Structure formats: C-alpha cells, structure tokens
Image (tube, rainbow, N blue to C red):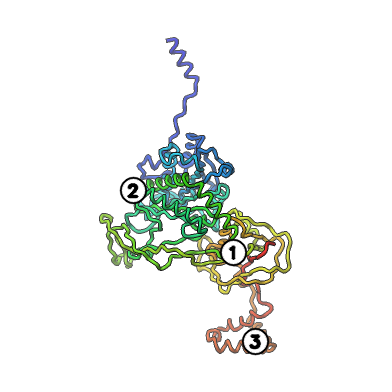
Amino acid sequence: MIRSALLLALLSTLPLAQAAPDLSTVSERSGFQQTGRYDEVIKLCAAFQAAYPKAVKCIDFGRTPEGRSMKALVVTKSGAFTARAAAARGLPVTLIQGGIHAGEIDGKDAGFLALREVLENRAAPGSLDKQVLLFVPVFNVDGHERFKKWNRPNQRGPVEMGWRTTAQNFNLNRDYAKADSAEMQAMLALVNAWDPLTYVDLHVTDGAKFEHDVSIQVEPVHSADPEFRKAGLALRTNVLADITKQGSLPHAFYMSFAENDDPASGFVDGVSDPRFSTGYFPLRNRMAMLVETHSWKDYPTRVRITRNTIVSVLAQVAEHGQAWKKTAAEADARAAKLAGGPVELTYKATDKARMIDFRGYAYTRTPSEVSGILMTRYDETKPQIWTVPLRDEIVPDLIGSAPAAGYIVPPAHAAMVARKLAQHGISFRTIEQSKDKADVETFRAEKATFAAGSLESHQRLTVQGAWKTEARAVAKGSLYVPVAQAKARLVVALLEPTAPDSLLAWGEFNTAFERKEYMEEYVAEEVAREMMAADPKLAAAFKSKLESDPAFAKNAHARLEFFAKLHASWDERLNLYPVVRTATAP
C-alpha cells in the first residue's frame, strides 16, 4: 500500500502526455457533406506542425484586405524548411493551391486528407524525402468566409461554401499577370521566394451533365518553350494514368461545349492567357496543372478524385522532379537568348477535328416555356455515348517578337512598371544618364479601341500598329528591362502592347491614347485655308480625298482633322505607346 501510494504521488508530479492532435477535417467527420470555416485551416495548420514537427512548418505568407492571415504548410522530410535550403539542396518544390475560387473548395479538404496520408507513408511513400510541398489550403480567404448555401448553384455539395471572388470582388484566376489583388501579390512573393517547379491549381468546373469526372490540363504542353513541353506532357500523361487506374474518367481538355448548351458541338482545346495560372507559369518556364473536378459529381466523389490527383502529382515529382528541374533550367537558359526572335503571344485550336466517344447521358433539346430558348435536359439514369468532334490541334495565333536588347520605360511610368515587374521577380535597372537622341523602336497605334465596360476594375484597351525605328530622347530615371533573363517570355507578355495581358491591354497606359488638346473649328478653318494656300500639293491631296472617299467628304470633323494632324499644334504623342524597344543596352 505504501509503495502504491508513493508511486501514485510520483506519477502525479509528471506532466500528462498530450493527446495526439486531431488532424481530421469537418468534411471527413461529416461524411464529406460539409466543409469547415477558415478557423479550421488555422487550427489544422498548427496541428499538423505539432504532430509532425520534423516534417511540417506552418507559415503566414500574406494578409487579406479584410485582415485575415494567409496560411501555407511547408511539408518535407528533407529538413529544407526555407526556400534557401530547398534551393541549396536542389530539391524540386511543388505548390498545391486550393480555394482560388472559394466556392470550389474540394482542394482544401482533399489536400489535408492527402497530406495526412502522405506524412504517414500510406500514400506516395517516400515522396516527401525528395521534394518540398507548399500547400495553400485556401488562396481566396476572404471569399471563403462569405459562406452560405447556394454560393455555387451549379454544384453538388458541400452544404455551404465560400464565394468565387475576393472581398474586393477580384477573380484571382484572372489576376496572375496584372497582380492587382493583395492576395495575388502575396502568392507571387511566395512563388518568387520558393520558385516551384510545379504549380497545381485545384478547381471545380461548371458545365453540362456527363459521366466524366475530372479534367487535367497542364502547360507547357501546347505553349511556351518547345523542349520543356515534354516535361509538361509527361506530368499530364502520368497523372491521367494514375487516376484512371483509381476509377476516374478524366480528360486532358476543359469539358465545356464548343457551343453553349449543345453537346453535339463537341469540344475545343486551347491555351489560357497569362491572367490564368496555366497561362502564366509556362512563361516562367515552370509547369502548371489545372485540376477541374466535375461540379455535378457529389462532394465525396470530388474530394476523393482531388486527393488522388494530389497524391499522383507528389509521386510523379518525387520520381521525375530532378530531371524536370534540369529541363526547366535549360528552358531558363534558352529564354535568356530570345532577344530579337519570335515569341508566341496567343494560341488557338485549328479547324481540324477528330471524333471521340464521350460518356454522357441521354438528353433532349426542346424550347423552354420559361425562357423561350432551346434548352438541354439530361437523364442521368441513362448513360449514353456521344460521338462528338474534338479540336485539339493547337498552334500559335498571335506571334510577336522580342526586342534585340530590351524595353525602356520613361520616368513618368517608371514607378508603376517597376512595381509590377518586382511583383513578378523580373530584373530591371534605372538608367542613370539621359540621352538626347537614341535609336529606338516606337509603337504608335493606328487604331485604339477601349472596352465598353469594366473588367476586373480595368477598362481594357486593344491596339493595332507596328514597331518602327526612330530617334527619341531617353531620360534619366527611365527603366531598362533586358530580355536576356530567364523570364524573358513573361517580360514580353507584359510589355508587348498587343499581348492579351500586357500592362497596356489592362489599361495601365490608357491616357496615352486619349486626346487632350483640340483646335477649335473656326481656328481649324483658318488654318486649313492657310495651309492649302501655302502648299498646293496639300490642297490637291485634300481635293483628291474628297472626291475618292465619300465618307470623308460627308464628315466635317474628319475634314478639319485632316489639316489639324499636319499642323505643328498636333500632339505627336497621341496614340504613342510610352514604352520603347532598344537594340542596345543603355
């Protein structure tokens, strides 16, 4: 009795062993009917670190406009918990991101599930020894907390979910190139620091009803560096094979009909512009995978498929990551030599189609008594094979060129452009000495068209024109952006005026295409008469245009502007893109 009492007394002085943290999710505990709020991400991030202190580090990488912390889990069994350590060891980095559209939240719940199984070596065993995983459970955190039923009316489950866009109503998957949002700026800072070889963007598609359950798109496969496309194709092929063995019915193209709501129209593959993740990362010579589970599959099914995809990616990077890193480095070296050569700015599918068997459902197309339009109605009890066209031969569409040396940005625009370039980790420098005359290329728009409405807070601009050589002054304080760098394709995408997601296209230079000074009509009348009296050839040219161009003859404003454009008062900078190109480094 004395010994027992003494033993109990001794035990009472020892600290109690802590219970193992619960690493399950609200989703798991609800049978994958629900998803948790963001406080669950914060708790799980800390809990995984506590449970696996030698394999997981929970970090903040930014704050949202509503003041929430943006969490990421750094996961590896290599001991490389910093970007510098990962680079020093030559480890491939895989960044897996959920909740960019916070109503499409499969990635968060699937990611935590996959992470636990991989850490336990029950899935992709050994994969964390050979890479660093950065897992961002929710990218659009503020949107995640705009939480209620029916935020995704075209989706089956979970019961409640977040919202597509941020608190500032930015669509983050339109923001990679322009990087307006605080969230994207934080993400790009994380990317610049860690330089992930593979970036996986987890979504849920909208669309029609059919049996196929997920699309896996990877770039580069059709775009960017031709040699590096082999690595992108290998990643895509291997992941498709892995998840097919696990029962999925995947496709390698986005399963949206060529003609809205018409299954018979088939499908058209393509390459996204750099506002999207899969258009952006190939310009950095890195791989991007877009995972789109099918919204009409239930939530347990979608989470399982997303989990399988994550595990497959980790296994593939573990096996092939070193070879792919070498290929990426070679693509970096080739990009730094693009100066003066052609650069593809956009891509398109050709008209060449092949017929595929697609697993759909029986359907009817009849006029709707509600809307009056032709409406497709599916019978999910009757699977049906659709034989439909697929256009998946992708070729360059708009091809530009890289300058022979680089771009020069004048001081008036230097601060804005420098901020954007820094967000992307692009190298540039400030010009310390002015030059009165430098042989440069200038771009003057022959036609400039402003969008009728706002898109992502911008009034977009499209221009038509060409680069022409002329002598212009280069002022001290201008920026010089060399093409001779690994991100050359991204440099061109941001600074070529006709590129779809250039700074010009997003309206950052709109004032250069707005006329500010005018000649009053009565003044223009006098000027026109004086100019014709002083120059008979000009008078003859005016008369010829009146006779040959009826529309011009009927347009009083155009007739006066004919002379105004030739007068010394005309603003020679109107429609002149402020950025110039140079063949020699200043």
Residue 231 at x, y = what percent? Answer: 48, 53
* Disc 2 from disc 1: Cα separation: 46 Å
Residue underneath mark 2: 247
Label at residue 402: 1
Query: In terms of depth relative to the viewer, which is nearer, 103 or 82?
Result: 82
Figure quadrant of the C terminus = bottom right
Secondary element under disc 2, as helix, strand or loop, is loop
Q: Specify whether residue 149 is in view.
A: yes
Residue underneath mark 3: 538
Q: Are marks 3 and 2 in contact (CB under 8 Å)?
A: no
Residue type at tag 3: Leu
User: Where, by quadrant of the figure, is residue 423 drawn?
Assistant: bottom right
Residue 218 at x, y = what percent? Answer: 45, 55
**530 relative to 259 in the view: left or right:** right
- Above or below, 528 relative to 349: below
Residue type at tag 2: Gly
Residue 26 at x, y = what percent? Answer: 40, 41
Disc 1 packing (10 Å; few <14; some 14–19; many ≥20): many
Query: In terms of depth relative to the viewer, which is nearer, 302 or 230?
Result: 230
Figure quadrant of the N terminus = top left
User: Where, by quadrant of the figure, is residue 533 drawn?
Assistant: bottom right
- Mark before the other along the chain sequence, 3 or 1: 1
- Mark before the other along the chain sequence, 2 or 1: 2
User: Where, by quadrant of the figure, is residue 414 drawn?
Assistant: bottom right
- Mark before the other along the chain sequence, 3 or 2: 2
Q: Are marks 2 and 1 in contact (CB under 8 Å)?
A: no
* Disc 3 from disc 1: Cα separation: 39 Å
Residue type at tag 1: Ala
- Above or below, 3 relative to 156: above
**248 relative to 580 in the view: left or right:** left
